[in-house]
Amino acid sequence: WNDANRLDRIMQSLTADYRRSFGGNEEAVESFGGALDAVRASIDEEQSPDGSGGGQTTCLVCIEDVTARQPIWSCPACFVSLHLPCTLSWIRSCSVITDAGAVANAASSSGWTCPNCRASFKAADVPKRYTCYCGRVEDPEFDPWLVPHSCGSRCDRTLNCGGDGHTCLLLCHPGRCPPCPRTVTVACHCGGGGVRKLRCGQTWSCERPCSRPLAGCEHRCPVVCHPGPCQPCSVRLNTVTCRCGSQQRPAVLCSERDWQCDRVCNRDLGCGYHRCQRVCHSDPCGSCPAAGGRTCPCGKLPLPGLSCSDDVVLSTCSDTCGRSLACGVHACPDQCHLGPCPPCREMVRKACRCGKTTREVQCHKQVTCDVKCGRDRGCGRHQCKRRCCPGGCPPCDALCGRPLNCGQHKCQSPCHSGPCYPCTERQVITCPCGFARVAHPCGSRRRGPPRPPRCPRPCQAPPDCRHPAREPHPCHSGACPPCRLPCGAELPCGHACQSPCHAAKLVTIKREVRGPWDGPAEVQELRCLPCPPCRAPVPVRCLGGHEVANAPCCEAKPRSCGWACGAEMNCGRHRCELDCHELVTAAGSEADPRHRCERPCQQSRPQASAAAACRHPCPLTCHRGPCPPCKLSASIRCHCGASKLRRACRELANAAEDKLADLLRCPNACQRRRPGCGHPCGAPCHPGPCDSLPADCEAPVELRCPCRRIQRLVPCRKIAKDSSSASISCDDRCRQEADLSAARRRRQAASPTDAAAAAAAEAATRQAEAALLRRLPQQQQQQRRRRKRTADEDEESGRMSLMIGLLGGLQRRWKPLTIAALAALLAAALVWAALSEEESV
């Protein structure tokens, strides 16, 4: 139901189908349309959050909306819904009874009327409780799934279809009940075409001549079978005479053959002497009015022997007339006379019509006074003011003129008592294009301007921007929504503006207000705003040329992409690690100061051999080509490794093989072990491996007998020449001492004291071995410290040489540096060296 246009189309389609089904029965179609309007009103009411919806009705008494939760009274004649308290107030004000608690008995003998259709109701019809539309349920509860004020049960109201006990089958609903849906057997209009099964209330024609006898003649109806009574006979007769037969008319319709002329009948009466004086007639003329006995004018003196044929003047008697006069009180005092009696001239005392004045006058005259009536007329607002009013003052002939409850019109009815009927005016509200119309009760503006109806057509308002037409939207009241189409104006960059249209934007303007007479401080005006910066995407390459990305046109300039630059440094070995930045392409990337590599040189110097390799870093920053010769001296081991020699790195690097061997020879003897015997070489320090043959080795070799008593030193070369000389046999003394030692051990094993001493000696030996083992790691740690100290001294000397080289390079590059600046740089280098040493520790 959210689509109002779709709902309207559904309603129109249902009405068209119903019209085709019922043919020309406009009353049934109108009733069905009323039911659809009630359904539409209930749907609109359900869509409202408070139940009052867009299809709510208006109470004509209080000019307020009738919502879904308020008790109502529905008129059974016009089906208008009014507030129940307002209806009771209306009935109370319409009644002559002023007791507010007797509303149920408030209707007078004339009853009360509906405020809308003015249908009359009796006192028994006064609503006492709030009921549903069908009247079976009192105080129905609100249900959002039902029509408001409905009980949800079947209506069951008796239908006016002519059927026997047919009731409405819809759920309890407002408005008239739709036509009866039952199927019944129906004869045609004339009754001669048989029967058919149709919906109750429908009729049909057999399409044959009606042939029903016409009233007043012998002809039959020639019209095709039709509803309702037959038309008058249309057969033309040649001649037709009037009722009295004195005149004739030619070519008269059969239905008009009974006609009356304007002549007197003039036919003889029964007496044969007088003629009938009645105008043309067809019935008998009757007897003679002068037949019977005749008397004098006053009726006192009979005149026998006279008949209606005696044309004589009746004589009067000498007696008083005595006939009753027109006043009905007195008799005629004149003598018997012909003709009517004169007016009564008796003098009587009469009161005037209002009874306030008495006077003696002739009986036939009326007495009137000049006193004006001061009683109120039926309206209760104006006095009668008639002279000598006899009572029963006439209704007030002035206009009411009181303002109606709408607050805009005045009552145009004759002046009356009680409240005025609600204003019957209807204010027609149309949509801006004028297609949709809705009539609101007059006075509904008191609670705000009425809402215009929904229109299914598109809005026809002209655009207020540069576009030729507005964006399609339904017809509405008030200002159109802002244009949401793209602006399309050409920008200085050449692109078309893609922002929403801003040619007519509401802008709040602040004004200087000096007082309330200057109006509000903020005013909204429609203004054409300038186009915003162009946001069209355009391809833009980053500063370093790594990628091409889309960027808004207004921000279309090279920017950093966030990746590393990657350009080659001036050293030719490294790449720029800075964020993407602009390159100096005119002179190459090397001309950019940011591409000057400031890293320490990591190249290895050229070396003649592994032993003469220079381990000092290059004092220059990273550069192209080979490093300059090293100017520092290095501590290097001799060939035998027993001594450390101080030699210039430059000499070691440029020396030939024989010259290098002389530079690495120490003045001491070679301390390396011979591979054959393991004794020191003893030869002058020399390169290469030592002689593996011990033939010329003079190192003494200690030899012992098996019991280790006999000790002898033998040259190593002798043992190498004669292997038998490498062992010594025990002599007799050795054997004697061995026997003594065995006897001693036997005695110690037999003596407990000796055993304890032996155990103590063994424990002492073990403690001495444990102490030796504990001192061994300390000695190893001291040796490692000595080796590390030697390495640190070498590294410090290399670092100092690097600093000196750097200072030399700086001095050559920036000659204007003063001695103080160089000293400061040197101090900084020393601090850096100290910090590096602490970090290493």
Image (tube, rainbow, N blue to C red):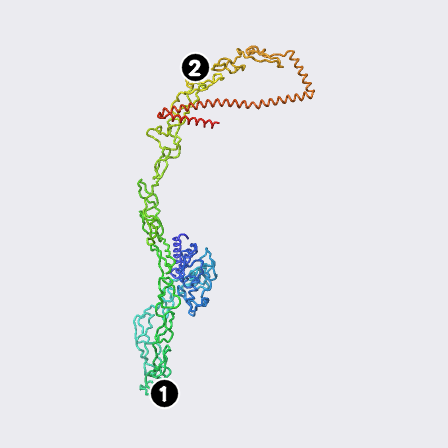
Instruction: Please state which of residues 599 and 547 is positioned toward the viewer in this rendering.
Output: 599
Which of the 4 image quadrants contains residue 304?
bottom left
Instruction: Please state which of residues 700 and 836 is positioned toward the viewer in this rendering.
Output: 836
Which element carries disc 2, helix, strand or loop? Answer: helix
Q: Which residue is mark 1?
A: 300
- Across and down, in percent, residue 298 comes to 35, 86
Q: Amino acid at mark 2?
A: Lys
Q: 10 Å neighbourhood of mark 2: few (<14), some, or many (≥20)?
A: few
Q: Left or right: where does residue 458 sit relative to residue 92?
A: left
Q: Which residue is mark 2?
A: 659
Give the mark, 1 or 2, whose residue is nearer the N terminus.
Answer: 1
Direction right: furthest residue: 750
User: Total number of numbered labels?
Assistant: 2
Q: Is residue 78 visible?
A: yes
Q: Is residue 196 visible?
A: no
Q: Left or right: where does residue 794 sit relative to residue 719?
A: left
Residue at figure coordinates x 36%, y 87% from the top left: 300
